[in-house]
Amino acid sequence: MSETNSPAPEAAEAHRYTAAMAADIEARWQDAWDAQGTYEAPNPTGDLAGDPAVVARPKKFIMDMFPYPSGAGLHVGHPLGYIATDVYARHQRMTGHNVLHTLGFDAFGLPAEQYAVQTGTHPRVSTEANIENMKKQLRRLGLGHDRRRSFATIDPDYYKWTQWIFLQIYNSWYDADAKKARPITELVAEFEAGTREVPGGRTWSALTAAERADVLGGFRLAYSSDAPVNWCPGLGTVLANEEVTADGRSERGNFPVFKARLSQWNMRITAYADRLLEDLEELDWPEAIKLQQRNWIGRSEGARVDFALGDEAVTVFTTRPDTLFGATYMVLAPEHPLVEKFVPAAWPEGTNEKWTGGHATPAAAVAAYRATSAAKSDVERQADAKEKTGVFTGEYAVNPVSGEKVPVFIADYVLMGYGTGAIMAVPAHDARDFEFARAFELPMRCVVRPTDGRGTDPAEWDDAFASYDAELVNSAGDGITLDGLGVVEAKAAITDWLAERGIGEGTVNFRLRDWLFSRQRYWGEPFPIVYDEDGVAHALPESMLPLELPEVDDYSPRTFEPDDASSKPETPLSRAEDWVHVELDLGDGVKSYRRETNTMPNWAGSCWYELRYLDPHNDAALVDPAVEQYWMGPREGAPHGGVDLYVGGAEHAVLHLLYARFWSKVLFDLGHVSSAEPFHKLFNQGMIQAYAYTDARGVYVPAADVEERDGGYFYEGRPVRREHGKMGKSLKNAVTPDEICAEYGADTLRLYEMAMGPLDVSRPWDTRAVVGQYRLLQRLWRNIVDEETGAVTVVDGEPDEATLRALHKAIDGAGADMAGLRFNTAIAKITELNNFLTKAGKPLERSVAERLVLLIAPLAPHIAEELWHRLGHAESVVHQDFPVADPAYVVDEAVTCVVQIKGKVKARLEVPPTISDDDLEKLALADDAVVAALGGAEIRKVIVRAPKLVNIVI
Ligand code: ANZ
């Protein structure tokens, strides 16, 4: 920071706007705002109830994606979005809105737990220290947050309600007819009354408690299941697919990973797939994010088709039922449960050697192939470029429409978790099937006539013909012919044909999977679930919430021999014996129970935090319904309700934003909230990038100490290379807001971040450019305060026309820009006005000075508050009205309009550029010169092209 000017506060400078002056102003006003509760937003009811006149204003609920309190603290990239929402919130406050803006902390998570494992410090201790540090850093920026509403997800008062929501979800089921979640008690009532059939066909009263629990588990929106997961004994934990490498090892530690069936909690988000898709339409979100959500949900329309295999039917899911005549083999996922049932003892006569994988029997081939594919991740199995592998099962199925026998393979390019885990392979028209068929010498049949001149014999093709825009061939059979139909008609025809025979039906399939909701971690919310002696799960009653984390000595999960595939995870909580084994009365006397020892994933706390900001101290309810309705409820333009503006990074396109939408919908269905969507408008801010510098060895050198000269960059005298990257510790280029605040003040930092470019675009940080905004504030100060004496220099009287024009244009443009989140152009307009006033070189009229201060107040609130008070006001600038532009001064000065009669110019009028055709016609016809030229002649037609031309035909 050596090259920037940071003048010491000398006596001669006592009245100049310097860093020292900024520091003093900013600290003083931050204290005053806190003391006066300047940013406290009143609720319509409850203990935050405020002034009814304020509550009656239109509301604006403005939110940021809340931060994880990392030990490294903030760099200047982090607050970009927070400053933007703050400027917007301030502008909204000044334009008559009741604004709610606050910020909490998303504080469960792995880093604190790992730090605890290394140092023995309790995660709560380190997390709370990090929160304190971050709060200090954020406060220094002058963010106008309602601090009464802030919380952290680790607060027991908060996670009590996270657990409570879990119980609501656990205690409900999705009624597909009503298209909504309903209490599980209503399902039980229907089973008891016999109005709904119990799966399995027995009567409800005939089932044991454990059997009933099992049946309900198939309906609950939160359920435990033993689906295959990635189990890593060496780390002692289950891993997400993204944490497993292509060779089936853990990314961290490089230990083997096994597919194991382990009992884990899941959320039935798939029940909401359709609504999550449909309701996207009404949201004011960036199109790119909507598209990512649509792809993630992945709705495919197609059909299920049964292929007979002995006495069994193997059901496939296909999006191209029209190609059924071209299905020349089948593939099942290696894990498909039917595989065990039909594998014959020996290979059928004449089996192609390529199909057997060199094994003596189908059973041996299948077992060997299953073992290798179990060690692979789904991502790896699906990789398009990968060579297709598989083995023949020794069995043939029957193509239902052609009657042909088709060989059945298992291959890992078919996933168990999608569709039905089985496909009909159409090698002529599907790229992956084409490659597989080539490798295994399987027959191909063209059933969609190629439109690219390649002919209809797939033996001569280089790849599959996959277009939809063509007609069917080679597709005639038992009572049906598709030949000559287009793909769309053929799909409909074959689907009807299958349905009539009861061997298929049209169906919709989703890519979306249920959400794996448990983790083998310490630092997360405990599940409010206990198991009885029979292993049946029971929900804790609300009165036992919050269920707090126990104290433990060791925060890490137990690890095993890395290749001990038979091991089972042992969670940190399971070692807290006194906590795990409890005697409880759950309504039928005191009994022994064992607590669930997994914890919730760190997404849980961010699934509903917008609701808690509304009513943070309510201990009787998640949120008061009237309060929720006021801030979040459906309204014009937002039929599903939701936060008015939510700003955060685009990296949260699916997980957080999808999970939060899902929880909102469940709470809405169960009647706890009036909003079915959490965030009505979403805006993604860009990233602040930074230059990083590497020396000859490619090692990063501290960016702050790099010098620029002669068009090159030097560190300790030696040339270094400049590159563009993220800001952070590892690139040695992090700049902290604290440094910039110390050097120039928070107002300068705020202006610089907002001026760097459009908010949604990434931009490179350049410390040397910050001084430009500092100078803007210095000129602003000098325009109002005498630097020698500290006296306010404004005068009474009316500003001249040119000043009024400059002022009103800036008000008009900057106000619209702030409302539209275009802060960079707002700053450009204010700068232009300030420069104009500086150049005029005379004292400002009071009315000009005051409006200038109000104009910049959302962007640079501290200097604005100081100047506002120096101008003689006792009340805060924060709640003043934003200036309103007088349209008369906003438009450009008059333009010249020519008036023609019979094509000859008879008059020239000076008119406002915005004049309407009607007004211009009246003006022209009333003009003396025009009246004289007309001489009373009858007017046949007047052609008006405002504002430049009037043509009169006589
Ligand atoms: C026959 C066919 C012919 C197919 C054709 C495609 C083109 P989306 O669109 O992603 O839903 N498929 C079905 N289940 C699968 C599984 N578990 N693992 C791997 N692939 C699976 O994809 C649906 C298509 O992917 C289905 O339609 C099926 O191949 C395949 F010319 O069936 B299709």
Image: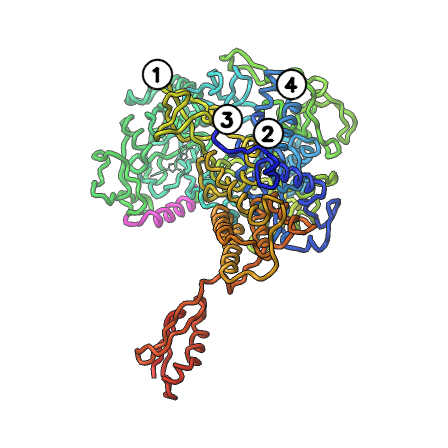
Q: At 43% across and 70% down in the image, what residue appears?
A: 911
Q: Earlier in the sequence, mark 1 or mark 2?
A: 2
Q: Is residue 850 left or right of residue 825?
A: right
How far apart are the alpha carbons under marks 2 and 3?
Answer: 23 Å
How far apart are the alpha carbons under marks 2 and 4?
Answer: 16 Å
Q: Marks 2 and 4: CB-CB under 8 Å? A: no
Q: Disc 1 marks which residue? A: 359
Q: Would residue 197 be visible to someone looking at this image?
A: no
Question: In the image, what residue type sits under mark 3?
Answer: Ala
Q: Earlier in the sequence, mark 2 or mark 4?
A: 2
- Displayed quadrant of residue 363: top left
Q: Would residue 562 be visible to someone looking at this image?
A: yes
Main SS of the magenta part reads helix
Q: Residue furthest right?
A: 589
> Which label was assigned to residue 240?
3
For mark 1, give the secondary structure: loop
For mark 4, give the secondary structure: loop
Q: Disc 4 marks which residue? A: 121
**Could you tell me which quadrant the C terminus lies in?**
bottom left
Q: Disc 2 marks which residue? A: 69
Q: Residues within 10 Å of mark 2 (few under 14, many from 20)?
A: many
Front residue of 730 and 623: 730
Q: At 39% across and 81% down in the image, what residue appears?
A: 929
Q: At 71% across and 23% down in the image, what residue appears?
A: 593
Q: Earlier in the sequence, mark 1 or mark 3?
A: 3
Q: Is residue 130 left or right of residue 543?
A: left
Is-magenta flag for residue 491? yes
- Magenta region, residue range: 482-503
Question: In the image, what residue type sits under mark 4?
Answer: Thr
